[in-house]
Structures are given as structure tokens and as C-alpha cells.
Image: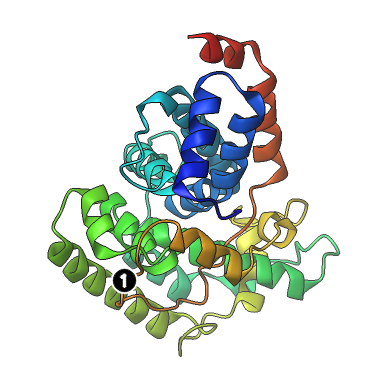
Amino acid sequence: MNKKTNEELMALVNKASAGDRKALETLVIDVQDIVFNLSLRMLGTFADAEDATQDILLKMITHLTSFRGDSSFTTWVFSIAVNHLRNYKKHMFAHYPLDLEYYGDDIENGKIQDVPDLTQNVEKDILAEELKMSCTNVMLQCLDTESRCIFILGTMFKIDSRLAGDLLQMTPEAYRKRLSRIRKKMADFLGQYCGEYGSGRCKCKDRVNYAIQNHRIDPSQLDYIGATEISLETMLDVKSAMEELDVLSQDFSFCKSYQSSERTKHLVQKLLDSKQFSIIQNS
């Protein structure tokens, strides 16, 4: 994201609303990564995040004229994204819900030793890294939607409690209390079961074949390994564009950020080139 003043952003919004394609593309490019990362954490898979990102960016485009500059543009888009994702029912985990008890039981009792080699000649270390990133992201799906949103806003994006409270329609105090409880719940789970981030016995390298058998990772499609990680400096620029940081924020090392996938970029470009976009421009 390139830093822009409020005046520059309002000028871009006004141009985009008037049908300036270049201005609109600039706005889309500036926010697509933050929308994609929020979607990925809320929904759990790259495919679902890609679809939701397209939906959210379309909402942003069709509601541009309602942006008045009362907040930063990033905050405004983030609000659209949060509201969309809290009610999103089309993703895989909406149909196959998880909870921490099920996840813990699978770690303790999954018969990983009975599974043959399914690595398809892909290095096990690479598959273990893919599983680690997938597992810690899927673990978020063990939380109910609101708890997941609270955790992601406070832990990954480090959103100020006042802004987060506004987004979730609760007081800053209520948000901070819930965030603290959810963080402890997640940290306790990691400490008990995870051998990568805690003292548990679960090691990603030992569970690679079991994960492949259960369709948790696919050696032929390594989404996390293939994604380009966003630098910490870039993410800090995004956060600073959204308001003051919350002093309660802490670093969970599994919360990496990624550039929008190539499929997402292709879908967005396809949207901008479509007849649908022309209708939006002229509406």
C-alpha cells in the first residue's frame, strides 16, 4: 500500500466515482491485500478467500459514492469486509464446522502411523511448512464467527479497541475483555497440543501424510508455500492507515500476511474489464 494523504484519497475516490478507471484500479490495488488477508483468516482456505475478496471489492466499488472521508479509506473498506465476512455462509467451514475439542481429539487420537507415504515426491519439509501454515489458519475456524473476528482484528491486524468496538458494535471495554479471553483460550490450546508453538506432541512433519489423506493439504497445490509473504513494514503501513494501534496487541507468529493470490488479481482484473463494471460506472 502506498501512503496517501486524505486529500489524495478523496481525489481518487471522486475520480473513481466519476468513472475514472485508473483511479479505481489504484484504490482496488491499495486495499486488495488487506481484504484478502482478512478473508483468508476468517474463512480458512485460499479458494474461499479469493471468492470473498472479489465480492467485497465489488461492494466497495458499488458503494464508492457513499464514502465521505469521515474515517480513513482503509477503515471504510475494512468495515465493509468485516460486515460481509461475519455473515458469509458460502465457505467450506460453514458447512463443516470445527471446534477446539474436535481438533484436540484429532491430534491426540489420529492414527498417523497407519498412513502410507502420500507425499508424491514433494520434500517433506516443504509439506510440513504448508501444513503448519494451514493448520494454524484452520485452527481459527474452531472459534465461533464473532470470536474469530475479535481474535483476528486484535491479534493479526492489531486494530485499536475503539475502532474494533465500532466494527463489532460493542464497547471498547467489552472488546478488550473478550479479546483477552480468546487469546488465552488459543494460547492454552497451542501450549497443550502444538509442538511447533507450544509444548504439545503434535509435529507437522509427523502428520504430513495424515493431513494429505484427510485433504488438509494437497502436494500438487501448495497455497501457502506458493504465496508471497507481505513484509512487516508493509503491514505496519496498513495498520497505521487504519487508526492508532491497541496497546494490548501481541505477536502470534503464525499470523503471516500474504499478497493477494494470482487468482484474486485475475478475478479483480476480469471484473474491471467486464460489462458489469461498465454498468457500475454509468449507474
| Left or right: 149 as drawn, with respect to 222 | left
On the image, numbered disc 1 is attached to which residue? 246
Residue 58 versus residue 131 in the image, above or below: above
Name the spot of residue 183 as percent of width and height, x first: 31, 73
Task: Name the residue at 69% across, 20% down.
Answer: 273
Residue 4 versus residue 121 in the image, above or below: above
Task: Name the residue at 50% across, 61% down.
Answer: 137
Task: Name the residue at 58% across, 37% down.
Answer: 28
Name the spot of residue 182 as percent of width and height, x first: 27, 69
Q: How many marks?
A: 1
Query: What residue occupies the far bottom of the structure in this picture?
Result: 199
Mark 1 crowdedness (10 Å alpha carbons): few <14, some 14-19, many ≥20: some
Q: 18 and 55: which one is in front?
A: 18
- In the image, what residue type sits under mark 1? Asp
Name the spot of residue 22 as percent of width and height, x first: 66, 30
Q: Secondary structure at mark 1?
A: loop
| Left or right: 251 as drawn, with respect to 162 | right
Residue 209 versus residue 204 in the image, above or below: above
Residue 74 versus residue 200 in the image, above or below: above
Quadrant hosting residue 178: bottom left
Quadrant hosting residue 263: top right
